[in-house]
Image (tube, coloured by chain):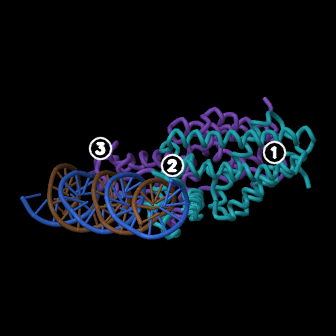
Chain colours: A purple, B cyan, C blue, D brown
Amino acid sequence: MTTASNTREKIIDQAFKLMLQRGLNGFSYRDISEPLGVKNAAIHYHFPNKMDLIAALIDENHQVLKKTTSEFMAYGGPARPQLEGLFAFTMNQCQCGRPICMVGALAIDYDDLSDDVKDANDRFMKDSIKWLSKVLETGREREEFTFEGCAERKSLSILATIQGARQMARVHGMDILESMFEQIRTDLGIKD
Amino acid sequence: MTTASNTREKIIDQAFKLMLQRGLNGFSYRDISEPLGVKNAAIHYHFPNKMDLIAALIDENHQVLKKTTSEFMAYGGPARPQLEGLFAFTMNQCQCGRPICMVGALAIDYDDLSDDVKDANDRFMKDSIKWLSKVLETGREREEFTFEGCAERKSLSILATIQGARQMARVHGMDILESMFEQIRTDLGIKD
DNA sequence: CTGTATACTTACCTGCAAGTAAGTAGGAAA
DNA sequence: TTTCCTACTTACTTGCAGGTAAGTATACAG
């Protein structure tokens, strides 16, 4: 079959959504297979066990963000649009039914994760921190942002804030997300 | 039996720990009953179903934090020790095998929650925000802290940061927690 | 037109999760 | 001393979870 029966991609899409809505232990194979009109065994065919699936989801997540951040990067020099790109990406994810982020979803089930998955997650976080650190550093040099201390630490704290905010938004509504972005801007000395 | 067979409290203790390690869907009745040397049905006796248990856990969490914050309050005027109390409390929780916070644990399983549990969680968050807002406002008036914008928004962002940081700490080790506290201090203009 | 690889389905298995109903041990009250 | 209440245990039930083995439809290669 060279026919593009994109079942694999559909499974990843559906599982990705479920993962970011309910976490690793919050969904089952049935929750994936039923809406897709396939059988559970079809999932096992593509991903022998659940950890294989999760590993694929982390890769997917990594690639999506990489693609998106490379779009921010295309803006060129200014740091501000890149930061705004991160906010927009976050907001967009939440609006697309992905209220929590991958790192947050995995943190809770951390003990269950295979080493492969842990490593993939770790790489993803390191990549994110690296990217944001650079944005912040650039922004400070260009005098777009003002903040005290080390850029890496600051970037970690911003990522932590966004991660926490996404979870809080679930309880308090999405409005607080924009409010948190505004606070991050304020803390970076951005006035507009 | 007036004898203090504190099974109920033991169940809450164990479930509380499990909840903050693995989340709502990450532990079973067996994980509670086995280490306690009782049967699953003993849990059902005290908490007819899982939501009743969870509701009790939120109450427990609320009371623990209330007790702890009232101890901070006893410091009297200065805001700084109260903020430090929050940091110490967080650090202590993590060191006692409770890596993630209740709000974070529930956010992932939010769709599963009963209305009662959602309400309890909501009250808890509102209480926390109220307390921290007051601390921040006091601190700003006393010129212990400097920050721009509304105290409530700032308090929300600090709570979000701590929540996110606890989850990240799971991946990157507990050291980043102290580092995040330091960043929060820096962002509040605290130098020492 | 035969063989082989891909992408599944059918039909199963094991195990555990939550939950229930009925029984029981041991005070406390009458 | 019986009776009742509390705090359980024993012995189930139902249902779904993840996972497997064997069969099948289709395409393409030679």
Q: Which residue is mark 3?
A: A37
- Mark 1 falls on what kind of element? helix
Q: Which residue is mark 1?
A: A140
Residue A137 in the image: state x and y as whole percent. 77, 49
First reached walking from the N terminus: tag 3 or tag 1 = 3
Sort mark 2 into few (<14), some (14-19) or many (20+) by Cα contacts within 10 Å. Answer: some
Mark 2 touching mark 1, by CB under 8 A?
Answer: no
- Mark 2 falls on what kind of element? helix
In front of the other: B160 or A103: B160
Q: Is residue B123 left or right of residue A141?
A: left
Up/down of A25 relative to A89, above or below:
below
Residue B136 in the image: state x and y as whole percent. 83, 41
Q: Chain of mark 3?
A: A
Q: CA distance from mark 3 to mark 2?
A: 35 Å
Up/down of C11 relative to A87, above or below:
below
Q: Choose top left, top right, bottom left or bottom right for residue B158.
A: top right
Mark 3 touching mark 1, by CB under 8 A?
Answer: no
**Residue at position x 60%, y 49% from top?**
B58
In front of the other: B160 or A185: B160
Q: Chain of mark 2?
A: B
Determine if marks 2 and 1 fall on one subunit.
no
**Residue at position x 91%, y 38% from top?**
B141
